[in-house]
Amino acid sequence: MRQSVDFENVSTSGLESSPVAPALAGLRANEARYFKNKYDHVFSVAPADEEVEALDWATRILAEERDIVISSPPLEVTSFEVGGYRMVYVFYESGLSINVMYALEDGGKRAVGFKLSEGMEVPEELAERFKFARQKSKLAGVIRGSYFVIKNGY
């Protein structure tokens, strides 16, 4: 069952098993605030086992584009269309958040973004492949992020 993410009263609901649950909840809330402010879209998430199709799609893109398999269990997933893009977010127990931004029209922007919650180490499967830039967030503290461009069609 989907739950709307409240970015004013940040909750760790659904993320309790993460060792960095408060930071991951802040990261999730930061994304919710962005989509509400930019697109007036309510960001809602569901347990990963309820959003299997979206999770499989994101997992396939990681594997086929860069041979990446995330070792941490996924906790929550959301999938939606907004502003001409299909968006999928996966929040992992380790504190990692992955988003797939996929333009619906050919020739549009398509990329996978990685964000690391404050207090987590860079996952081994990403450490040697990506450099992470830092950004500050009132909701999430210091977020480290990176991305890659999707080359193939999905």
Image (tube, helix red, strand yellow):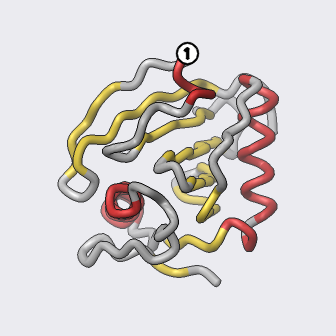
Where is residue 109 drawn, in percent x and y? 58, 33
User: Looking at numbered disc 1 in the image, what kind of residue is underneath it?
Assistant: Glu
* Quarter location, residue 144: top left
Q: Is the residue 2 above or below the residue 120 in the image?
A: below
The local secondary structure at tag 1 comes to loop
Quarter of the figure with the C terminus: top right
Q: Residues within 10 Å of mark 1 (few under 14, many from 20)?
A: few
Q: In percent of the image, x 51 and y 66: which residue is there?
A: 17
Which is nearer the eye, 16 or 26?
Answer: 16
Side of 82 relative to 38 (left or right): right
Where is residue 150 drawn, in percent x and y? 67, 28
Quarter of the figure with the N terminus: bottom right
* Quarter location, residue 32: bottom left
Q: Is the residue 45 above or below the residue 20 in the image?
A: below
In the picture of the structure, the residue carrying the numbered disc 1 is 128
Q: In percent of the image, x 26 and y 36: which residue is there?
A: 135
Side of 23 relative to 101 (left or right): left
Q: Residue furthest bottom?
A: 1
Q: In percent of the image, x 44 and y 40: which residue is there?
A: 115
Where is residue 14 drawn, in percent x and y? 52, 74
Q: Is the residue 106 above or below the residue 48 in the image?
A: above
Side of 148 relative to 51 (left or right): left
Q: Is the residue 6 above or below the residue 35 in the image?
A: below
Which is nearer the eye, 88 or 96?
Answer: 96
